[in-house]
Amino acid sequence: MSALRNLPGWARWCLYATIGMLVLDVVQGFDDTDLLTSEGASRAMLRWGLPILLAGLGGLFAERCGVVNIGLEGMMVLGTWFGAWGALEFGAWWGLLLGALGGALGGLLHALATVQFGVDHVISGVAINILGPGLARFLSSEIFNQKYKDVGGSITQSPRVPTVGRMTFPFLSGGDLFGWTTPDFLGWFTGKDWFLVSDITGFARGLTSNMSWVTVFTLALLPFCTWLLWRTRFGLRLRISGERPEAGEVQGVNIYLYKYIGVAISGALAGLGGAFIASGELSGVYKEGQTAGRGFIGLAALIFGNWRPSGIFAGAMLFGYPFALDLQDLEGKASHALMLVTAIALFAIMVWAIVRKNRTDAILAGVLAGLALLWYLLADTLPDWWAAILPYVIVLVVLIFFTKRLRPPAAAGRPYRKGGG
Amino acid sequence: MRKSKRFTAMALVAAFGLVAAACGDDKESDGTSAPTGPSVGLVFDIGGRGDQSFNDAAAAGIERAKAELGITFTEASPNDDGSNRKELLDLAAESSEVVIAVGFLFEADAAAVGVANPGVTFGVIDSAMLDFANGAVPYGDNIAGLVFSEQQGSFLVGAAAALKSTTGQIGFIGGVKGVGGLIERFEAGFIAGAHAVNPDIEIVSEYITEAPDFDGFNAPDRARDIATAMYEGGADVVYHAAGGSGAGLFEAAKAYRDAMNINVWAIGVDSDQYNTSDPAVRDVILTSMLKRVDVAVFEIIKAHIDGKVVGGPTVYDLSVDGVGYSTTGGFVDDIVDQLEAFKADIISGAIVVPTDPAEA
Amino acid sequence: MTRIASVLRRIKTDAAAPVMALVFAVAASSVVLLVAGSNPIQAYSDMLKHASKLETMIDILNRATPLFIAGIAAAIGFRMNLFNIGVEGQYLLAALVAAHVGGLVHLPAPLHIALILLVAMSVGAAYSGVAGVLKVTKGVHEVISTIMLNAIATSGLIVAGLQAWQAGGGLGGNVTRVGTTPIDESGRLPNLNGFVEIFTRDIGRDRELTGVLVVAIAVGVAYHVIVGRSRFGFDLRASGANPFAAHVGGIPPKRMIVTAMVLSGAVAGLVGMTEIMDGGVFPANPIQGLGFAGIAVALLGRNSAIGALVAALIFAFLDISSGILQNTGSASREIVQIMQGLIILAAVVAYQVTERARAREEAKAAATALAAVAS
């Protein structure tokens, strides 16, 4: 155990990932499927996880500057509408930009209410969740149902939305570099069909090839947000607004301004998430109700990730993986295999709890593991509804055992008045 | 503090009351010009006019009735959660001679309002309007159920799929499972039709969500992933009965065809989706299963004018062209003869199409 | 004299908030209506004329009843600083189980009704209690756990329950009505038309005032008395306002959290009663979203019973108005949703502004008084 702790972070994560792949690899053999470690699964995991990541990052910026943002869902809805409209009107990249701006509009409204008028953060968020869909529908009836009526637009739906191009990483997965097709290393390994190695490279290839530029851009946002919040003066001031605004004020930070900016960025990120959903990467069309609560899931990812970008990313992927897998799993083999994975993970948690001498956790994990194993053994296929709720169950179970001392920003949700103390 | 809240509440009520009093009696009647035909109140399903499918078909029917029968009409669609269905029917019944409710979700409410308004004709799409609790008798002589044999239309597109498939594998995507067996009928017909052409054909079926989770009708992104998985798994024709999610199927078919250069197809539903979809994806739409809601709407209004309304179910099946398949785009021109032969067999009763996927 | 002046000032500031909110919401909605090419005055007059009819009032009350109960359920959590997003899943699950149990048993009316209410409250309380227990034992934030539990209920437990418990029937070729076994007449609350008609003319056509209104009133009164007047209510509010101080004062915060979640869930369990007590079944297409609407009602009503009542009536009025707007063609129905959002925002902003104005005025008054004493 101590040897593990001495490893640098990246090495530890690589080790965990390898162990995880090994488990997936072995388990899927029992169910005679290779979906769990397939290139398609990892690519889809990314696709389905990214909107949640963006919503989570949106929540991060708001809460880091001290504003709770329940309105992420409403801002995301605005993002889907403006994203589709922008893409139709001006082109794919403009769609993303306008989607972000649409979300930022919701963010500014939230900031106006919470920062300017000191309104309860939750109440303003709820109002935005009601306003967002209402406004989107209203705009659809004015624009999609009129100007775009003949090409598939309607009061609930936009015409087909143009999409940005795709890219494949050079060298890693054989992308083009200035017109020269680089060697496809991961593809070469995957083709060899070596146990474990080929599965890992295949999975990695899904994360590095044939990905939309939106995906690349969104992934790049992750380190950028970390850098912005923790390595810059701007980030420090933003975080002070959320931790100890009074102290910041003493030092001459314009807390209001930073809160405004933070909440606007929050809305923009949620809006970008919405635009992503409407873009060709996921839907290729605006459809009323298509966010399906992903703003709320983003909020959950934020808490799951302990208000840190890397944690939010982990939460989003943990959610995206089983969700995406279920869609590709036409024969029900993968969701059956995932049951065994769940059981193994729970047994691991049990062992971990025993080592930690945490009796209640050990018993709880043991019982859950036993139940999962029993279900796996007794049923050949699992009911469809089980696959539908699996992402939620996993997140809940992980939280039950690993809610380490999560620490929200100290002043999140607290109304702040200039000079109010 | 407490007192002030109470006062606040009273003030709010008073304010509303004042405005109500001020506006309450400024106008007496709207004074519309005298219509030649009866007045009709059309109540849409959730989504309302402009959904390019079910509701728009009903709208087309009433527009035709307006043009040909000289009726006047009002239209309304319920709140997103469907909480005001009954209120909308009540409103329509107060001002119209004919009330048309689009969708079986109206069944219970339409029965109640219909019984209370015996002078008004009620037409409910997709419900038989039979009182099963009392021995399956019609709720009333004025309450007609307009039901469709979707399984028959689905049989024909299933046959078309099997005839067009070169891989021997086809797919079905349903929107929401467990909504009164409605979507399952599409699946049953599709499977039966495909098997009638090729008993060995492999059919993959997948539903996006299950009741009471209705996201499955609004999830083009999920439909797209499912369809892509089907195409990648070897299916080359996929049929959807998933409402607004269908756009995702067309998108997947288009993308797969462009990327792999394999001629995969998608099949639309309810209306002729070749005409309503984005021009860029039209060339992947093999055909559409037509459900002539417009015909049913038009005919119930005509029946009212002629005094021929019958309580209980009126079935719109292949024999009256209540369901069918579209030929727009010309992709099924080469197999029309075979499809017409199946159609004749179904109409004559030589083929009985099942309604339960388990029997197909 | 000064007393009267202060009372007058009080009235001025008290009335200012709702009037401001109303004026702002109406003005903003009018702009939207004008942009959409509708006549706002026509639309508002249609809405109010419609709402002044007895039958429409019944509709509004029927809609307001579950909204109000959901609002109280959310308010109980808010009082304790708990954000119970899970009202949505709790009421749907509770309604499903209650409808199933109610359809299975045959009992005399009072017992049957009591059993159904009890089952609904227990299921709601238990499901909400899970979030409470997870919070105090594992530190899982109630927002995230209730979001997960909502999804697990609507996409999982209720799907499985509906499949297992649905009552068949219907003819081949027609849509089967899906839902649980119908509850006997004895298990349904009678409508209140007879009671209303004592005071009014006969209620026209098929309008029935839901009997669940009585349950809602009982919930409202109980909430008002328990939270506002009892020792427990004091503890709850104290613990919500400052758990550390309350803990020092002898109020166990963990137990208060679980109790508040359980109570909130128990009330949430009653939200679905309008659906199953009137219709007699839990349908495959239950009315959803009441939980989220309840949060808005609680917030607009500032967590008080009377505030929630007013908020529920306003929301119900707007919901019902969407019908008449479409019927007369005076406006599209989206405007109703936009108005609801605007009203919430306008109301809270107005509250906040007047509160500040009052604080300023009080400070000024105190300063004047102080100055008077000093001189």
Image (cartoon, coloured by chain):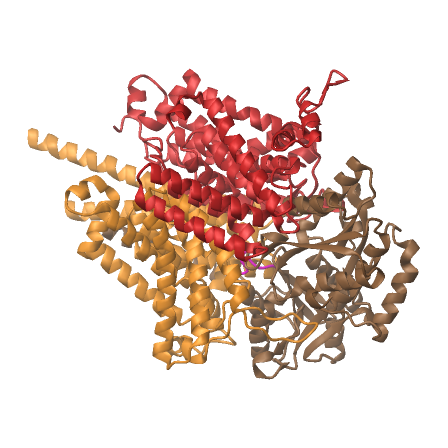
Chain colours: A red, B brown, C orange
Q: Residue at x 32, y 21 (%)?
A: A248
Residue at position x 52%, y 41% in the image: A319
Q: Is residue B159 left or right of residue B310?
A: right
Q: Which residue is located at x 89 percent, y 51 percent?
A: B330
Q: Is residue A287 magenta?
A: no
Magenta stretch in the rendered image: B77-82
The image shows residue C243 at horizontal and vertical percentages of 23, 42
- Residue C330 percent coordinates (x, y): 59, 55
Q: Nearer the viewer, residue B213 or A90?
A: B213
Depth order, front residue of C101/C281: C101
- Counting the numbered discs, the total is 0
Residue A340 seen in the figure = yes
Quadrant of residue A283 within the rendered picture: top right
* Principal secondary structure, stretch drawn in magenta: loop
Q: Residue at x 52, y 31 (%)?
A: A17
User: In this rendering, would C119 be left or right of A268?
Assistant: left
Q: From the viewer's perspective, is B315 left or right of A217?
A: right
Q: Quadrant location of residue A146?
A: top right
Question: Is residue C299 shown above or below A175?
Answer: below
Q: Taking C288 as reference, is C348 left or right?
A: left
Residue A58 appears in the rendering: no
Quarter of the image for the C terminus of chain B: give it: bottom right
Q: Whole-percent x and y of residue A63?
A: 40, 32
Residue C60 position, x and y percent, is 45, 64
Residue C95 position (above or below residue A252) = below
